[in-house]
């Protein structure tokens, strides 16, 4: 403890040359802060969109009431699951530890907005209402309703103008709509939310699903939801199912099914790459802006730095001044960037219904990137300073 007192006392008495040089030209400092804030906003938005991409496209997966999931080996993601024989579900029931194996149907369909009459894309999900497939209370309270012919439940968090429709359904009034040119009754609401894949979700029974999509072979399913007996080990049952079932199905745990969806959007689509590229571009833009400011500052004060060298100050001391400026700019630019990002998150969330929220982890991550960004700029800007010879300055 005593050993720390002396360095802290020296730090307190130290003249803040970095701050004095920055604040001497307030216009240049404000331009630098604005540039860093812009770079931070760019990184915040790209990281926010990337997280919203993964979160929005896996919310349905998260709500599944299942221990294991069967999918086709060629399945790409939730809306491109392909299909496999329904008898695989019956075969899975023969495996010890399996309690139930139920079908799940998923397809993107054309939906005509009851209010605007405009067509959009919604995800239609069909399942056996006698075996609740989702941990969604509002869905499970309306299982008897979706057994009725041509009856569906509507996602109130869908993207679009549905205030009037939602209000009527909430009052207990059935609303007629059109899906795939077939008239349906919307008799209940639930909440999941829009995603990058679809503007919303309709849920119905497996029988209603087959009515909406008559080309769907009743002997085939898109996915199988397997619930295990109490006490059964999901990993052990998974291994038994893999060896027992033919190669036309894959057996995933619920978490693997979630990761399967994330990996699709991260690695097999341009969207994931674009968001990563956006973060990298924001970082590079920040490095360039801070470098320009620090390089100009070093050039403008080269005479003063040469004087310090002639007086016996080592390069480490002079470099510390430049790095001090870089860290000050890092903090000053981060704060407005964080504030602006909060506002943009709110605006985007209201406009798109995507789960775009600021998190502490993301804020800390961008702050760390910000410090690294400014440190790199400082390191580049000091190359000329390190090579300077006092004899050449006078």
Image: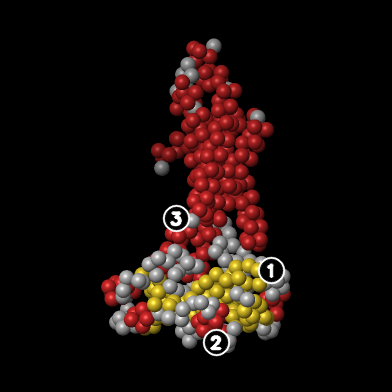
Residue receiving disc 1: 118
Residue 276 at x, y = what percent?
50, 49
Residue 264 vertical placement versus 87 (above, below)? above
Label 1 vs label 2, nearer the camera: 1
- Quarter placement of the N terminus: top left
Label 1 vs label 3, nearer the camera: 1
Residue 155 at x, y = what percent?
60, 73
Residue 192 at x, y = what percent?
56, 71
Q: Secondary structure at mark 2?
A: helix
Q: Secondary structure at mark 1?
A: loop
Asked whether the beta carbons under mark 1 and mark 2 sit within 8 Å of each other, the answer is: no
Residue receiving disc 2: 147
Q: CA distance from mark 3 to mark 2?
A: 39 Å
Tell me which numbered mark, 3 or 2, is placed earlier along the sequence.
2
Residue 266 vertical placement versus 59 (above, below)? above
Q: Secondary structure at mark 3?
A: helix
Residue 290 at x, y = what percent?
56, 35
Total marks shown come to 3
Asked whether the beta carbons under mark 3 and mark 2 sit within 8 Å of each other, the answer is: no
Name the one closer to the observer, 213 or 200.
213
Residue receiving disc 3: 267
Residue 218 vertical placement versus 28 (above, below)? below
């Amino acid at each position: 403890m005593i050993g720390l007192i002396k360095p802290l006392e020296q730090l307190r008495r130290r003249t803040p040359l970095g701050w004095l040089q920055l604040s001497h030209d307030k216009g240049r400092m404000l331009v630098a802060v604005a540039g860093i804030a812009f770079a931070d906003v760019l990184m915040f938005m790209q990281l926010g969109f990337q997280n919203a991409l993964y979160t929005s496209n896996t919310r349905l997966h998260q709500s599944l009431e299942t221990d294991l999931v069967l999918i086709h080996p060629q399945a790409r993601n939730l809306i491109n699951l392909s299909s496999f024989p329904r008898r695989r579900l019956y075969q899975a029931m023969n495996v010890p530890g399996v309690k139930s194996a139920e079908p799940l149907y998923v397809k993107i369909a054309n939906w005509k907005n009851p209010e605007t009459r405009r067509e959009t894309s919604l995800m239609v999900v069909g399942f056996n209402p006698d075996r609740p497939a989702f941990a969604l209370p509002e869905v499970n309270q309306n299982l008897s309703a979706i057994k009725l012919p041509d009856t569906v439940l509507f996602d109130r968090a869908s993207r679009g103008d549905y205030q009037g429709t939602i209000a009527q359904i909430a009052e207990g009034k059935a609303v007629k709509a059109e899906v795939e040119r077939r008239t349906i009754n919307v008799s209940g609401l639930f909440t999941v939310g829009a995603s990058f894949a679809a503007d919303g979700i309709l849920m119905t029974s497996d029988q209603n699903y087959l009515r909406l999509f008559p080309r769907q072979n009743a002997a085939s399913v898109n996915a199988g939801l397997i619930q295990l007996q109490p006490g059964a080990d999901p990993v052990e049952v998974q291994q038994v199912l893999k060896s027992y079932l033919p190669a036309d199905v894959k057996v995933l745990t619920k978490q693997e099914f979630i990761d399967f969806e994330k990996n699709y959007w991260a690695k097999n689509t341009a969207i994931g790459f674009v968001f990563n590229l956006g973060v990298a571009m924001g970082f590079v833009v920040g490095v360039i802006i801070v470098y320009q400011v620090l390089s100009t500052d070093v050039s403008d004060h080269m005479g003063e730095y040469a004087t310090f060298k002639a007086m016996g100050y080592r390069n480490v001391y002079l470099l510390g001044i430049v790095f001090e400026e870089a860290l000050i700019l890092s903090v000053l630019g981060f704060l407005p960037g964080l504030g602006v990002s909060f506002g943009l998150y709110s605006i985007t969330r209201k406009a798109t219904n995507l789960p775009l929220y600021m998190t502490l982890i993301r804020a800390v991550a961008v702050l760390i990137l910000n410090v690294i960004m400014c440190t790199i700029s400082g390191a580049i800007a000091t190359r000329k300073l390190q090579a300077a010879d006092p004899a050449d300055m006078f």
